[in-house]
Amino acid sequence: MRTSVVIVGAGPAGLLLGQLLLKAGVDNIILEQRSAEYVLGRIRAGVLEQGAVRMLEEAGVGARMHALGHEHGGFDLLFDGQRHRIDLKGLTGTSVMVYGQTEVTHDLMDARAATGGVTVYEAEDVSIHDFDGTAPKVRYRKDGQTHEIDCDFIAGCDGFHGVCRKSVPEKSIKNFERVYPFGWLGVLVDQPPLHHELIYANHERGFALCSQRSLTRSRYYVQVPLSEKVEDWSDERFYDELRSRLDPEAAANLKTGPSLEKSIAPLRSFVAEPLRFGRLFLAGDAAHIVPPTGAKGLNLAASDVHYLSTGLIEHYRKGDSRELDAYSHKALARIWKAERFSWWMTSILHRFPDAGDFGHRIQQADLEYLVSSKAAMTSLAENYIGLPY
Ligand code: APR
Ligand code: PHB
């Protein structure tokens, strides 16, 4: 078998890259270790920057997003019992789109099926070879048989635990990492959101977030120590904890119901450098992780795919490799800014076990400055809506 680009991983990064390449006439095969149902069952964040919206439109999957997604012109920050609205639209002229990642993945899968793109689900033991030479190969097993694909390039879109980054010799890659001493306990529920926009709360009991997927489906989170076990959290205990971290009006508006999903996610910042190793390119969570505060994960995958797809398409269309050569540098410059923003938003909104009194006062000062300075709010807003690309 032969194709131009083998894409490992059918998450949003792999599917979006595959779709943009197909549209430009660059053939590709996606190899995914899980089933399509499994991929669609993963619950992740749901806030899209305008850049990601534009990329999805370019990939031809904008229609359902525009019909079902909701534009949000702002969000609330809650601390010391007071809510402060961050007027994203007023400060930057731009809003964000609230549309779940599950839906994005669904739309991309449908589009790929409609364009006849090949995706091999349940591809086992994917391994990548010879990417430091001119003729890379990718092997996998499916239904007991081993297959080999010859290609020009490999795109490692296989997430943080994938095989691509791990196949790079240790001496060629540098990893940067910060692990946070807490996680997010999240609940998905079929009830209307308690507020029409998102609320991010810093409370003495810990961070809380009131998010949403639609007018009838809500997503809530509370910060918990990493030692917590999800089995110890009944729905009732979760809602009581959430209410205790909100202002009376928000708490009174919380509509509860049986959780559709409940899980604890650890928080991590991670970047691998560089993003290119010969004919292997890393993109999305395979290359970097952000803590979920600010919802940059999917948005960063989209900007990586913008730079990478541009590079690959120019290589095939014009025989011009300058954009491809610039991929790692250009993508990393934006990645680090989103890493900084996610780290900062995490640090002002969470309770850190080792912050001490000094750390706590600094955090308070950061929040008070933020909501009293138009310059500070504009900086928050322009990062939240997404830096340009
Ligand atoms: N072989 C094949 N596929 C693999 C392998 C492997 N060895 N390892 C992982 N995968 C698949 C995973 O099953 C997953 O479907 O790669 C895919 C990676 O998808 P994501 O983890 O969603 O990563 P990405 O596409 O970069 O998405 C970035 O979306 O999922 C969120 O938190 C993520 O918000 C971030 C954004
Ligand atoms: C979510 O809806 O899951 C979500 C929204 C905003 C965030 C993080 C997660 O900052």
Image (cartoon, grey):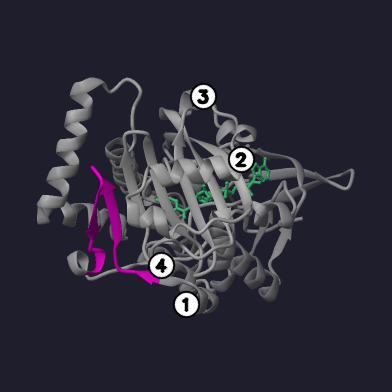
In x, y percent, where is residue 374? 11, 56
Image-based side of 136 in relation to 300, left or right: right
Q: Residue beneath label 4, please?
A: 97
**Is disc 4 placed on a helix, strand or loop?**
strand
Mark carried by residue 234 = 2
Mark earlier in primary sequence (4, 2): 4
Mark carried by residue 66 = 1
Q: Amino acid at mark 1?
A: His
Front of the two marks 4 and 3:
4
The CA distance from mark 4 to mark 1 is: 9 Å
Q: Residues within 10 Å of mark 4 (few under 14, many from 20)?
A: many
Q: In the image, is the residue at mark 4 within 8 Å of ligand 2 by its beta carbon?
A: no
Q: Amino acid at mark 3?
A: Glu
Q: Is 161 placed above or below 214 here?
A: above
Front of the two marks 4 and 2:
2
Specify the segment rendered in magenta.
71-89
The CA distance from mark 2 to mark 3 is: 43 Å
In x, y percent, where is residue 337? 29, 45
Q: Are marks 1 and 3 in contact (CB under 8 Å)?
A: no
Q: Are marks 2 and 1 in contact (CB under 8 Å)?
A: no
Q: Residue at x 28, y 60 (%)?
A: 388
Image-based side of 140 in relation to 245, left or right: right
Magenta segment includes 78: yes
